[in-house]
Image (cartoon, helix red, strand yellow):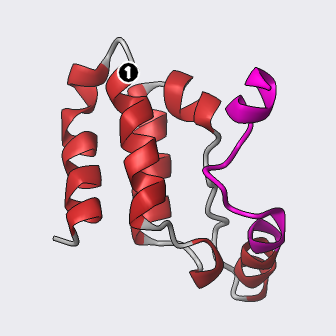
């Protein structure tokens, strides 16, 4: 169960990921990567920040995150040992969740 949860992309279905990838190829756009829970918990602050900003702000319709998904992301970020380094990203998550 733990590996399954770590590899979960916050509930984004594989069909949506594939549709988004196809759209990116069709419009010659860099693919948007929806991170796994493990990636959110372990990637460097710079890498996860870039990844999450792209997912929240510049992704195809098929994978636009819901407020609930970003709340889950925020919970993982807050558990990280380096969460202080991620305060701007956590604030961005708060703004996304509240619709600001």
Give residue 11's position: percent from left, percent from top: 66, 56
Which of the two residues, 68 or 80, is positioned nearer the viewer here?
68
Residue at screen point 41% across, 54% down? 70
Q: Residue furthest top?
A: 81
Which of the two residues, 92 or 25, is positioned nearer the viewer here?
92
Left or right, 2 with reference to 95: right
Q: Is residue 44 above or below residue 13?
A: above
Residue at screen point 66% across, 49% down? 9
Q: Quadrant of the C terminus?
A: bottom left
Q: Quadrant of residue 80?
A: top left
Residue at screen point 50% across, 61% down? 55
Which residues, given as a range, are shown in magenta? 1-18
Is residue 8 one of those drawn in magenta?
yes
Left or right, 42 with reference to 31: left
Q: Quadrant of the N terminus?
A: top right
Is residue 50 one of those drawn in magenta?
no
Residue at screen point 20% across, 34% down? 87
Q: Quadrant of residue 77?
A: top left
The total number of labels drawn is 1
Can residue 54 be seen from the camera position used here? Answer: no
Left or right, 40 with reference to 78: right
- Residue pointed to by mark 1: 79
Q: Residues within 10 Å of mark 1 (few under 14, many from 20)?
A: few
Q: Quadrant of residue 98?
A: bottom left
Give residue 10's position: percent from left, percent from top: 60, 50
Q: Is residue 18 above or below residue 28?
A: above
Left or right, 18 with reference to 8: right
Local SS, label 1 = helix
Give residue 20's position: percent from left, percent from top: 72, 75
Give residue 27's position: percent from left, percent from top: 69, 88
Q: Residue furthest bottom?
A: 27
């Amino acid at each position: 169960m733990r590996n399954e949860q770590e590899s979960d992309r916050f509930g984004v279905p594989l069909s949506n990921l594939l549709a988004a990838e196809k759209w990116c190829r069709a419009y010659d756009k860099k693919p948007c990567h929806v991170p796994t829970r493990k990636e959110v918990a372990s990637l460097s602050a710079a890498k996860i920040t870039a990844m999450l900003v792209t997912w929240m702000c510049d992704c195809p319709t098929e994978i636009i995150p819901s407020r609930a998904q970003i709340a889950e992301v925020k919970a993982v970020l807050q558990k990280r040992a380096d969460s202080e380094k991620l305060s701007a990203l956590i604030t961005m998550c708060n703004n996304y969740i509240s619709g600001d």
